[in-house]
Amino acid sequence: MPKITIGDKKLTFNNIYYVDSTKGLDTNDGSLSSPFATVNYAVSKCATDGDAIFAKAGTHDVTRIAGAYDSGGLWDDNKAISFIGEKGKTVFLCDGTKHSNRDTHCIMFKNAGTRAYQIIFDFNTGSRTLNYETSICYAGANVRGEVHNCVIRYNTNVSPSLMYGNSTSATIKFVNCIFDVQKNFTSSYSGIGSTTLENCVTNFTFYSEGTRVNVYNKCTFDSKYHITNFDEIIQGIGVYSGLYGWLVNKFLFQSNLKGYSFEEVERKLDFILTSDTSPPPFSVSSSGVYGVAYHAWKAFDRDIKTSWLAPNGSTTNQWITLNFGEKVNIDSVSIQGISSAITSAYVISANPKNLKIQGSNDNASWKELYYATSLIWTQEEIKTFSFENYEKFQYIRIFIESNNGAPYIGISDITFGFKGLRSYKLPSCSMRNILDYGMSNTPPMNRTIHENNYVLQTDVSENEDKVWIKELDKKPLSISFS
């Protein structure tokens, strides 16, 4: 019987049907070498129990258009199916804009034996706003099943609800999942069904309903859904933890039967200013401000309704600088254009047209890191500027050469970030660790492993999985061998 290994667990199925959204055909046989094109067709081929669907990396449109109440999301046709994706690479699109029925939902499992693993659900509710119209889960009266190590990306600016359930047998369980939403959760409709959240997190706040075990609110994530403000491994939360965790699969180096693996990470510097000098050590300065309402720190208060504005009449060569208090490595800057904080006629034209991103360690001599010209904005748009930078600077300045025609220059919000590496030192250079943490260019494991000393770091800390972890600022430019 075919098997699939997910994290530390081997799962056995009667049949595994493969889906490739770019190279597959629904006239194929669904094998690894001859995959289907769509998940929905693969569902139709599954038996009542015991089959799996493995969706390869890419975006799969699973939108189902059915009745007034049960359209939009992933459907199991009341079969006990295991839906499996490639960790961090398989996206299931549930697009409510594609139909005009009253409701749209994301996860629509009727069978209690249905499972989903390692999938990013991209959920768009369209213009719907009510909790029963836009709930994440629904399948007639009886939504059931479990969702493991998945991301539910709720792409609509309304308060999400977990379930629309009209029956006491309606149950759904989420384990080690991340809910990436845009507002705090609201209550589920009717409250008859039950939900379980275990080791789950959200960037806003869950509603106090159902069974909740080891649940975290107001989390921040990087682009790969690593949790940046809590220790995800120690706390056992999020998609990288748990029985079906997203394991590292990068480059493995060996030394004295020890393994070293790297994973690229992206981080945002997480701070919120409430004045020009808080919280320490951060402080902000600028070329000036327009009146009393548009201080420089308001470009770092994480509120898009507030803005920094340069003095009235200052339309060229204005700047805003953040002092980090220590030298840091920055290779990305995100700038959010101002919204309707001032007269709407100037909303777009006040945003930067030509700007430079500069670094300094004395707040006097500046090195240009990035130069952007002819920028065109829409209201409340975010632009991200990424660049190669291997130096550390204490001061980062946004120097705005010109705006788009308003009598002042403004920025609503600025975020700094950098890419680097997380380094893992493994307990042993075993075949299991090579499979879990990365493939190497070493000879097969039944041959002698040469004892080369690959020195990658000296100060590390050990987590509960006995993996030694060290975060590096950047990719090493070279590795010395001795």
Image (tube, rainbow, N blue to C red):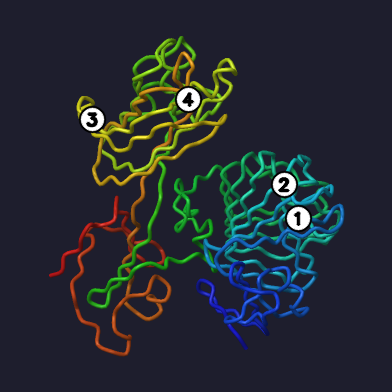
Instruction: Give the distance between the C-alpha atoms of the residues marked 1 and 4, in whole angstroms.
Output: 38 Å
- First-in-chain label (2 vs 1): 1
**Which quadrant holds residue 330?**
top left
Kind of residue at disc 2: Thr
Q: Secondary structure at mark 1?
A: loop
* Dot 3 alpha-carbon crowd within 10 angstroms: few under 14, some 14 to 19, many 20 or more: some
- First-in-chain label (2 vs 4): 2
Query: Which of the two discs, 1 and 4, sits closer to the camera?
Result: 4
Residue at which label 2 appears:
125
Residue at (28% x, 71% y) in the render: 253
Kind of residue at disc 4: Asn
- First-in-chain label (1 vs 4): 1
Kind of residue at disc 3: Trp
Instruction: Give the distance between the C-alpha atoms of the residues marked 2 and 4, in whole angstroms.
Output: 31 Å
Image quarter (top left, top right, bottom left or bottom right) of the N terminus:
bottom right
Query: Which of the two discs, 4 and 3, sits closer to the camera?
Result: 4
Task: Tell me whether circle 2 and circle 3 mark residues in contact (CB < 8 Å).
Answer: no
Q: Is residue 175 above or below residue 364?
A: below
Residue at which label 4 appears:
351
Instruction: Give the distance between the C-alpha atoms of the residues marked 2 and 3, in whole angstroms.
Output: 46 Å
Q: Secondary structure at mark 2?
A: loop
Task: Tell me whether circle 2 and circle 1 mark residues in contact (CB < 8 Å).
Answer: yes
Residue at which label 3 appears:
366
Q: Secondary structure at mark 4?
A: loop
- Decide which of 400, 404 is in the foreground and name it: 404
Residue at (54% x, 18% y) in the render: 346
Residue at (70% x, 52% y) in the render: 95
Which numbered disc covers residue 72? 1
> Which residue occupies the extreme front position in the image?
374
